[in-house]
Image (tube, rainbow, N blue to C red):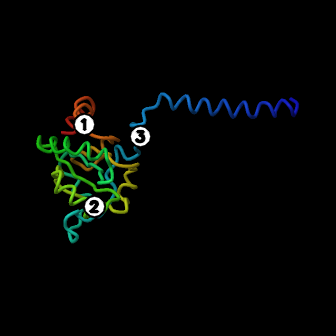
Amino acid sequence: MSKKTWLFLIPFIVFLLGAVFLFKGLYSDPTKLESVMVGKEVPVFTLQDIYDLNKQHDRSILKGRPMLLNVWATWCPTCYGEHTYLKQLAGQGIYIVGMNYKDERAKAINWLAELGNPYQINLYDPDGMLGLDLGVYGAPETFFIDSQGIIRYRHVGDVNPEVWASTLKPIYDAMK
């Protein structure tokens, strides 16, 4: 092939690769972010309780029963939207641990005082290190953890009645 042919082919090949990449994106679900943590034990951590600076929690609190670990923050409008439904789930006996993510403690405590507290335990992750270990992209995210402390599912986005009924409740029921 001549040099002129190659000069024509290079932009064409780059265009084709870009087109394939963008076309593939049209059919992907942005709420499905695969997690390498599914099927693995929750990473080792020590975090403060959101209310008590002297109280430390470790991963042992995420064992013993099926539960949800809900990652939330006051700066997250979607977290605000899902909060009422999380209170309903807690009222139905769903055990939920909250992890306040990259937030200010005072704002988080005020949020819970004003909106109600659906969480049995409240972890405070101000620098997002446990979030990083879990592969959190942002809030809200909810992890389904079995009684052995193994992550069974990761849900990105809000937990609402439709998502709970169609997808999440069967996963939670299977963990019981």
For the point 81% across and 34% down, the residue is 7
Left or right of 51 in this view: 140: right
Q: Is the C terminus in the top left, top right, bottom left or bottom right quadrant? A: top left
Q: Nearer the viewer, residue 128 or 174?
A: 128
Q: Is residue 53 above or below residue 118?
A: below
Whole-number angstrom distance, CA of label 2 to CA of label 1: 24 Å
Q: Is residue 173 above or below residue 135?
A: above
Answer with mark 3 or mark 2, whichever residue precedes in sequence: 3
Whole-number angstrom distance, CA of label 3 to CA of label 2: 24 Å
Percent coordinates x, y for residue 44 in the rendering: 32, 59
For the point 19% across and 35% down, the residue is 173
Q: Quadrant of residue 108?
A: bottom left
Percent coordinates x, y for residue 84 in the rendering: 19, 43
C-beta proximity under 8 Å, tags 1 and 3: no
Regarding mark 3 in the picture, which secondary structure is present there?
A: loop
- From the image, tell me which residue sits under label 2: 124
Looking at the image, the residue that sits furthest to the right is: 2
Disc 3 versus disc 2: nearer the observer: 2
For the point 33% across and 42% down, the residue is 154
Q: Quadrant of residue 163?
A: top left
Left or right of 117 in this view: 42: right
- From the image, tell me which residue sits under label 3: 33
Left or right of 169 in this view: 101: right
Q: Nearer the viewer, residue 36 or 55?
A: 55
